[in-house]
Image (cartoon, rainbow, N blue to C red):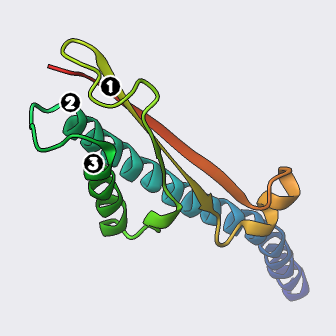
Amino acid sequence: MKSLARCRKGQALVEFALVLPLLMLLILGIVEFGRAWNAKQILTDAAREGARLSVVGNPTITDTSQVNPSIRRIVALAGLDSSQVTISYPDGFKTGTGNVTSVQISMPFQFVVLHRLVQLVTSSNGTMVLSTTARMRNE
């Protein structure tokens, strides 16, 4: 009777040892993709702010050199590397009343914990490019 109970305890230990790596991979994946989602939201907020500054009727803002530092400051305050950010204006800057101005921001995102796994699964080097666009009408 006693040996049968010991066998069951050993079985549970083996099952736990088999399931634990999968469980840890799932938890780490949730954390890593949560970080990526957070970075994407930061870029979206920065793009919105850049688009707002681009279309606002402020006569002192005349070119992108006055808007881009604000975008980079927002990204840096969130703890991301603002030197990695690429900012572009596909529709032009201050395109005139009634026209749409777009601000496109992209930045490479590096996985920390799942870096090697991402390299195995994809053809990238463990990074993915986060990109977002904000569009506002020039009033």
Instruction: Confirm or deny contact between disc 1 and disc 2 (CB under 8 A).
Output: yes
**Side (left or right) of 92 relative to 2:** left
Q: Tell me the CA gap for discs 1 and 2.
A: 7 Å
Residue named by callout 2: 55
The percent coordinates of residue 5 (x first, y second) are 82, 81
N-terminal of the pair, mark 1 or mark 2, is 2
Residue named by callout 3: 67
Residue named by callout 1: 101
> Residue drawn at (32%, 53%), measured in percent from left and top?
71
Q: Count the marks: how many?
A: 3
Kind of residue at disc 1: Thr
N-terminal of the pair, mark 2 or mark 3, is 2
**Side (left or right) of 58 relative to 114:** left
Q: Tell me the CA gap for discs 3 and 1.
A: 13 Å
Q: Secondary structure at mark 3?
A: loop
Instruction: Confirm or deny contact between disc 2 and disc 3 (CB under 8 A).
Output: no
Q: Nearer the viewer, residue 15 or 132?
A: 132
